[in-house]
Image (cartoon, coloured by chain):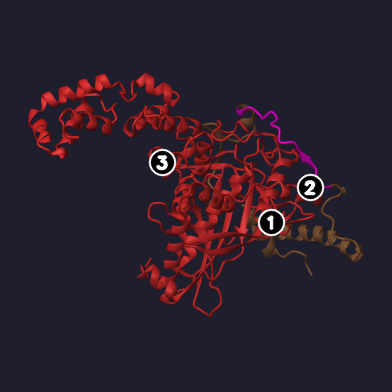
Chain colours: A brown, B red
Amino acid sequence: MAAISREEVAHLARLSRLAVTDEELDRFAGQLDVILQSVARVGEVAADDIPPTSHSVPLTNVYRDDVPTESLTQAAALSGAPDAYESRFRVPRILDEED
Amino acid sequence: MTTIALPSYEDATSRYEPVIGLETHVELGTNTKMFCGCKTDFGAEPNTQVCPVCLALPGALPVMNGAAIEATIRIGLALNCDIAQWCRMARKNYFYPDMPKNFQTSQYDEPLCVDGYVDVTVDGVEYRVEIERVHIEEDTGKTLHVGGATGRIHGATESLVDYNRAGIPLVEIVTKPVPGLGDKAPEIAKAYVAELRDIIRSLDVSDVRMEQGSMRCDVNTSLNKPGEEWGTRTETKNVNSLRSVERAVRSEIIRQAGLLDVGTRIFQETRHFQETTGDTRPGRSKETATDYRYFPEPDLVPIAPDTAWVAKLKSELPEKPSVKRARLREDWGISEIDMQSAANAGAIELIEETIAAGASPAGARKWWLGELARRSNELGVELVEVGATPVQVAALQKLVDDGKLNDKLARQVLEGVVAGEGDPAAVMTARGLEVVSDTGALQKAVDEAIAANPDIAAKIRDGKVAAAGALVGAVMKTTRGQADAKTVRDLILSRLGAS
């Protein structure tokens, strides 16, 4: 059985606002399925005494002091933006969302 | 869209039982952002408090702000929560330009604080609002929609984004659903948010200003018939004042009752509170937006607060606002209602400091709740920013107590203080507002007034003492209000042999 369905891939594409054609859906669903099946093999060897791992290093409580550091200049911050207007990043309107 | 007849609030709450829940976001007042060292100053030029981390440039890595973790734990402790011994941050994935990372770093199923409560008193009855969780996350950038109707997304063609706010530490406080409040639900919702504000303010971790957005509230409301299961809830956003919290719950109860009366199903949806009309309007459909695909944040290591440190933070919590209010109310000798209005005006600390600077409780309350409260309303600023300090108010009251200013002159002096003209004594001198205490000068003004009004003087001589008011007025006029009215009256009556 496939680890991910074509419908799930279409749903993820919609959430990511990616325009994906029917052919691409077929292709991506197949590719993602291979990836997921491969990763799922880890589950076959993980015993009950091995907890799920979210972090590769056994560290906790890594904090920074609440002291300001240098920010980018406005010009530098906007320099990589595809578009800017009145010192702000200019992006296309996103549908079906609101502040 | 069809309109349906809405029941009255009394009618709605006599037939349906509301269940409410509140989600409150509090922006912390740390010097720097949650995951980077950018400043958090309010009102800075757009995109000047940003860096590779909060702009999500490739390869940038976050590091948590220790002060924000401490502040969140203190909030949790002040809300009687248990503090997690180990928890993780999580990515909340969504596609919207207010977060450049395409996700918000938040917490999901492992919040830092759980299972607390806040007690609030409404009309002398105490209610317990249980807290489900308190977690730490980051604020989003500010978007401005342009093209089409200004500022609104409807018809807009593009958005302009300022990321100065993106990444500022944000604490989310979520209550458990609160049933059984009946028609008191709106008032209790408001009292809860007010108490939460006071508690957080007492911790000095945020300025908790609803009008500036450093405290924001979402209100969940559902209705059910007595004995039946809870109904479907709606979530009302954009509730930006204490008064709006109460109005939003109230209007949502009426709206839902109207729908249920005609057998219409309530949809789970996000609605927006309308400040002008006091009702709620539908917001976005959340069909796709609720699928956030949370997962543990791999770039931030788990939070594991040391038990002894948490115990120390708990032992160092300040006096609870409710306990402090009771203590001050007794000291000041005022009613619960007067105390409540002082609290609502944000005047308690100011009055307290004014008393500490030497004023009587009555004198301190009078200025902050009278003249200065009126002025802060007019200017639309918080009382604390009205332009007078507790020390200045105490000095003003002392000038009144010493007989150097009467009430009317004191108000003029205060006007000068608020306008930045200096301390009360300096304003009094500069504006020449001191009470005329020179009896010789006053006597002269009295004699002039008697000479100018022989008819009135004659009436007073005949024993019509009430007529003296007109002469007092005349003297006050020539002294430009800078005389003590009672002294003037006494002088007139003794001059005319009527005292």
- Amino acid bearing label 1: Glu
- The CA distance from mark 2 to mark 1 is 54 Å
- Chain ID at mark 1: A
Secondary structure mostly seen in the magenta stretch: loop
Circle 3: residue type: Lys
Residue B79 appears in view: yes
Q: CA distance from mark 1 to mark 3?
A: 73 Å
Mark 3 vs 2, N-terminal side: 2
Percent across and percent down for residue B469 are 18, 36
Nearest to the observer: residue B208 or residue A96:
B208
Where residue B327 sits: x, y (%)? Answer: 56, 50
Q: Position of residue B295 (x, y in %)?
A: 74, 55
Q: Which label is found at residue B366?
A: 3
Considering the numbered disc 3 on the image, is that residue within a helix, a strand or a loop?
helix
Judged left or right of residue B407, residue B480 is left
- The answer to whether B475 is drawn above or below residue B148 in the figure is above
Question: Looking at the image, do the residues carrying marks 3 and 2 touch, with CB atoms under 8 Å apart?
Answer: no
User: Which of the pair B298/B95 is nearer the observer?
Assistant: B298
Within 10 Å of the Cα at label 1, are there few (<14), some (14-19), or many (20+) other Cα atoms?
few
Is residue B394 a member of the stretch shown in magenta? no
Q: Quadrant of residue B207?
A: top right
Of residues B104 and B363, which is closer to you in this image?
B363
Disc 3: CA contacts within 10 A as few (<14), some (14-19) or many (>=20)? some
Residue holding disc 1: A24
- Magenta range is A60-74
Give the label, 1 or 3, closer to the camera. 3
> Which residue is disc 2 drawn over?
B309
Write the residue at 53% across / 46% down.
Answer: A93
